Amino acid sequence: MNLIQTLEQEEIARLNKVIPPFAPGDTVIVSVNVVEGTRKRVQA
């Protein structure tokens, strides 16, 4: 296993989340938590 795969597996284990398989052409929705000073918002 290369370094990137090792890091991915460690992060998945740490977060304890199941990541569903996806392939090219799939639609993926990504949301980012943005913190600006004391304000927090979710940016899609």
Image: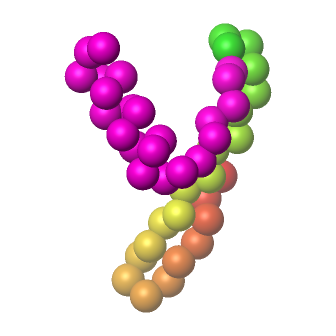
Give the percent coordinates (x, y) of residue 16.
54, 51
Image point 59% across, 47% down: which residue? 17
Image point 36% across, 22% down: which residue? 5
Front residue of 1 and 24: 1
Residue 35 placement: quadrant: bottom left
Give the percent coordinates (x, y) of residue 7.
31, 33
Give the percent coordinates (x, y) of residue 21.
68, 23
Q: Which range of residues does the magenta coloring cover?
A: 1-22
Q: So how many labels did they put on this image?
A: 0
Give the percent coordinates (x, y) of residue 15.
49, 53
Give yes or no for residue 31 being in the magenta stretch. no
Image point 43% across, 88% down: which residue? 38
Front residue of 24 and 17: 17
Identify whether 8 is placed above or below 31.
Answer: above
Left or right of residue 19: residue 35: left
Residue 6 placement: quadrant: top left
* Quarter containing the N terminus: top left
Left or right of residue 40: residue 30: right
